[in-house]
Image (tube, rainbow, N blue to C red):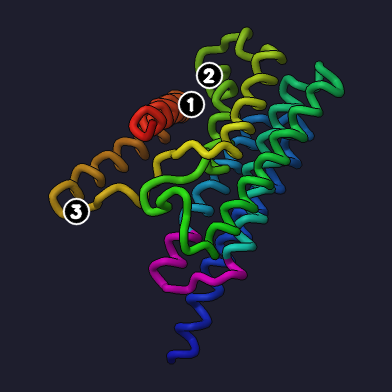
Amino acid sequence: MQNNSSYLSKYIPNSITILSLCCGLTSIKFSLSQDWKISIYLIIFAAIFDFFDGWFARKLKGGSNFGAELDSLSDFISFGVAPSILIYFWTLSSLNSLGWSVVLFFAACAALRLARFTADIYLTNKPIDSTVYFTGIPSPAAAGLTLLPLFIYFEFDLSIIKNSYLNFFNLAIIGFLMISKIPTISLKSINFSKKIAPWIVLLIVLICIGLISNLWLTLIILAITYIISILYTIINNR
């Protein structure tokens, strides 16, 4: 029985990570065929799977160095390559080599950020308390900010938001923020005490209702809220 439990604790999180990786790769396929919305849905599913693989690893106490390395590889594909490829074929392809260069820059920044994150696991003295903050923008959040122009475009049909140079600088800035050392909020820092637990549950329910009723507007609100949280943590830690 103990062997079965150990088997599950090791392979359930890794199986969920593989699902996240498959979603990221399939998103690239739909970006190539210009099915923008399906590509975005798959990146969202990849983010959901990415959350739950860590959650299951903590609950089942099945975290391992192998799982950490696999998670970084999955995140690179799903949140580094997939969103930048999507933005490239949506608007940046008109800039030719200039548009492709910023895609390479973003993907390289994602790889560097994930390599640093994996290396920090083995450090005992960390420059920033990982229980309170992340160092730089996490790759799933960076993918969401990268796709924010698409969310706005689908919700409000603003043609100006599809401007190639606007998306060029957006991709470049987010790539830089990924490898920066600014502290960004971590869910681990939220105190889920019994007193506020009902409010947390209510907030999650409201977000789920918003995602079902109006996906793009809800994603816009979540992205803007996250941007505000970045400004808050920067000011709070000056």
- Taking 180 as reference, is 70 above or below it? below
- Badge 3 crowding class, 10 Å Cα cut-off, few under 14, some 14 to 19, many 20 or more, is few
Picture quarter containing residue 108? top right
Contact (Cβ within 8 Å) of mark 1 with mark 3: no
Q: Which residue is mark 3?
A: 193
Please give the count of numbered marks on the rendered protein: 3
For this view, does 107 lie left or right of residue 63? right
- Taking 97 as reference, is 162 above or below it? above
Contact (Cβ within 8 Å) of mark 3 with mark 2: no
Q: Amino acid at mark 1?
A: Trp
- Residue at disc 1, secondary structure: helix
- Residue at disc 3, secondary structure: loop
Q: Which residue is mark 1?
A: 216
User: Toward the viewer: 201 or 69?
Assistant: 69
- Taking 38 as reference, is 157 above or below it? above
Q: Amino acid at mark 3?
A: Ser
Q: Amino acid at mark 2?
A: Ile
Contact (Cβ within 8 Å) of mark 1 with mark 2: yes
Percent coordinates x, y for residue 1 in the rendering: 43, 91
- Which span is picked out in magenta? 53-67
Q: Which residue is mark 2?
A: 152
Residue 213 visible in this rendered orientation of the protein:
no
Percent coordinates x, y for residue 187 in the rendering: 37, 47
Front position among marks 1 and 3 = 3
User: Toward the viewer: 147 or 64?
Assistant: 64
Give the Cα separation between the discs numbered 1 and 2: 7 Å
**Which one is earlier in the sequence, the residue at label 1 or at label 2?**
2
